[in-house]
Image (cartoon, rainbow, N blue to C red):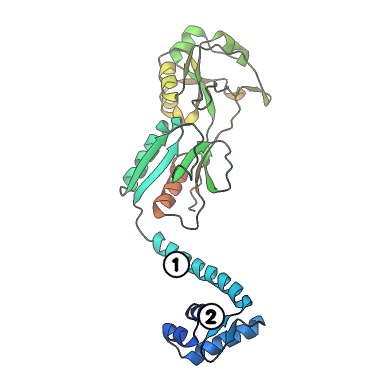
Amino acid sequence: MDSLGALNAFVQAADARSFTEAAAQLGVSPSAVGKAIARLEERLSVRLFHRSTRSVTLTPEGTLFLERCRRIFCEIEAAEAELVQSQEAPRGKLRVSLPMAGMLLMPTLAAFMRAYPQVEIDLDFSDRMVDVIEEGFDAVIRSGQLGDSRLMTRQLGTFHPYLVASPAYFEQHGVPETPADLERHYCLHHRFPSTGKLEPWPLVKDDVALTVDLPVTAVSNALEPLIHMAEEGLGIACLPDFTVRRQLRERTLVPVLENQLRRCGTYRILWPSSRHLAPKLRVFVDFMAANLFPANGGSSNPI
């Protein structure tokens, strides 16, 4: 603290170009300011000021040191502001980008809205790669590995693909026992809106990817229609587990070939890197990490 006091005396004297004015601002005597700076110069083995009877001016070393000192005090002010801000109630608009499958995350988002009614949620659903900073998003939720040095990231949890169809479908068309059997079934496909390509089904055998010529019965760039068509007995769909939890629990959809699918999917939340994390964003990140995938990987540790 003595060192900080000397640094503060140095900054005040440098700004005022006067030990007397610096002393008045600090509420101490001019001699106290002079002695503090003299001790600082002695410790640093460098002269910080040129002194005359009328004024003081910075030496080149003093000018360089002043820049560093300003950064130090800016960091201290930022730390104090962050602590004060952390005690404030989360409030204000929170702009979030989610994938098209994010519609199926609405129960968790609704729970967040009930828990933090003073946070205004502005949701943008898109599978395209958004520029978080340039487009003004507070947070983005996406699957897969995303790299941007300007962003902070936190894993929300993992998900697993399932091949599912209705019990009536399997009763009518039989249950596929190998991936090759799928070539004789009705297959419902998801198309990536960003690329127009069909999402591949992650079929494997002994951890080696399989290429199967899957029939194309229907295609959708959103998952909800695929879920509905599968429940209606129109075919087999490949869907993330979190999108069909209720259907699997109620047995309106049943899985097949569970051991021949690669179990690899991760959802992450990303936000602009900043020294200050607004309370509304802090609670959103923590809430989504704790509640979106509570059973399989969402960390409940606060930021």
Q: Secondary structure at mark 2?
A: helix
The nearer-to-camera label among 2 and 1 is: 2
* Amino acid, disc 1: Glu
Query: Could you classify mark 1 by the number of other residues whose Cα lies within 10 Å: few (under 14), some (14-19), or many (20 or more)?
Result: few
Upstream in sequence: badge 2 or badge 1: 2
The residue at the point 42 percent across, 82 percent down is: 25
The residue at the point 40 percent across, 36 percent down is: 124
Which residue is at the front of the view, 237 or 64? Answer: 64
Mark 2–mark 1 contact, CB under 8 Å?
no
Query: Could you classify mark 2 by the number of other residues whose Cα lies within 10 Å: few (under 14), some (14-19), or many (20 or more)?
Result: many
User: For residue 88, what is the image quadrant?
Assistant: bottom left
The residue at the point 58 percent across, 47 percent down is: 149
Q: Is residue 282 visible?
A: yes
* Amino acid, disc 2: Phe
Q: Is residue 296 visible?
A: no
Query: Mark 1 = which residue?
Result: 80
Which residue is at the front of the view, 282 or 170? Answer: 282
Q: State the image coordinates of residue 37 (x, y, percent, origin top left).
A: 56, 85
Query: Mark 2 = which residue?
Result: 10
